[in-house]
Image: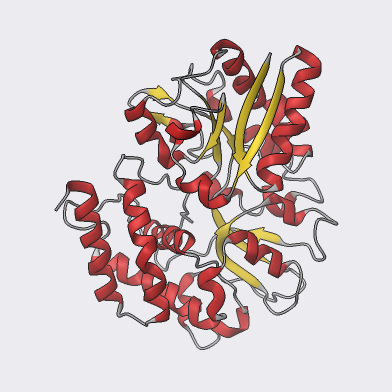
Amino acid sequence: MILQGMTWDHPRGYDPVVAASESYARQNGATISWDKRSLQAFADAPIADLAKSYDFIVLDHPHVGQIAETGALLPLPAPTDETASLGGSAESYVWDGQCWAYAIDAACQMSACRPDLLAQRPACWEEFLGPDAATFRPLTPLLPVDAFDMFMTLVAGRGGAAMPFNDERFVSDANGNYALSIMRALYQLGPEEQVEMNPIRVLETLSDVDDFACSPCLFGYVNYVRRGFRKHQVTYFDMPLCEGFSQPRAILGGAGIGVSAQTAHPEEAIAFAQWITSAEVQSGVYQANNGQPANRHTWQSFQDDPELSGFYKGGYRTIDNAWTRPREPWFLGYVDAVCEIISDFFRKNIPTDTFLAALNSLYRHHARGA
């Protein structure tokens, strides 16, 4: 029996599923091969199209509303270990009372730095608006999708995690203007090409050259804390707070593994999805091969590891309080529309209230056709 899977193109997305599949084949005799798609395609490629060719699809949780609507994937049995979910990782793949994927990889936006270059870590976002902001030497991924994710992270950090805010506005005026002001300040503190940078490119830059000391908001990748992975090690720390708030809030990322509704081997495919997301596998072959597990027990077991604690301990509080993005079918179209205009906010210096009005107009159009 041969099964085929589709994941995303990064050592964190590809290496652990390949290594785990080889281990599974030795134990169970099932051959599982993997293809990979770009990070952008991971965010927006239709799952229904991938499900025509693959038994497994590694996916992002905002897709689950469309998945439920199209029936592209099989509804799965509920996870057997309810204590294994890190933050909202497992719950993010549940929609309309059905589980559409198992959490295989956990991530959220957190803060990263070069510990040899950053003397003092920012404790609150307002520090980037102050006279000493340049001392942090920040580099921020502001590629459109990452910029919009940061916008939502900042709004959630101000207590605005209920998005949409109401039928007319995606976020409140106060929270929206606050988020945009922080983002503009970070853009002005770094190079213009930040609008073309995703988290991987920023982490590659941080770990290679000494020009920047931190990145206050990006999706964390455990690989960069590993000794020898790159020229310099990066470490992570909990997201800065918004003044007046005591909990870091950030966009939940990560990935889930779903099973195609068109697979010829549904029982075998579900059995593998359950196996690869078990604590034993996540803490073993998956983690050892550039994986970033979604299992809470795995994260806790590696918090005192001298090499990996900079990730598993450094950002644990942030990810355990992470915020799950909207998953309604309209949301992905709204994200695409925002991504078409958000770079102009930085490059053309559009006033925050003007740009916020545009975001809310797009929201009304996509959510209710107004």
- The colour scheme is secondary structure
Q: Residue at x 73, y 56 (%)?
A: 224
Q: Residue furthest bottom?
A: 131
Asked which quadrant contains residue 118, the reply is bottom right
Position of 130 with respect to 163 (left or right) is right
Q: Residue at x 24, y 59 (%)?
A: 362
Image quarter where the N terminus lies is top right
Position of 343 with respect to 120 (left or right) is left
Q: Residue at x 39, y 22 (%)?
A: 98
Position of 28 with respect to 264 (left or right) is right
Query: x%, y% of residue 187?
Result: 49, 77
Asked which quadrant contains residue 73, the reply is top left
Q: Judge whether residue 321 can be spotted in this image.
A: no
Q: Name the residue nearer the viewer: 316 or 168.
A: 168
Q: Is residue 213 above or below residue 160?
A: below
Q: Judge whether residue 53 can be spotted in this image.
A: yes
Q: Name the residue nearer the viewer: 255 or 267.
A: 267
Q: Residue at x 76, y 45 (%)?
A: 304
Q: Residue furthest left?
A: 370
Query: x%, y% of residue 103?
Result: 55, 33
Asked which quadrant contains residue 273, the reply is top right
Q: Name the residue nearer the viewer: 262 or 316.
A: 262
Query: x%, y% of residue 146?
Result: 49, 60
Q: Residue furthest right?
A: 228
Query: x%, y% of residue 38?
Result: 58, 49
Q: Could you tell me how many numbered marks the image carries?
A: 0
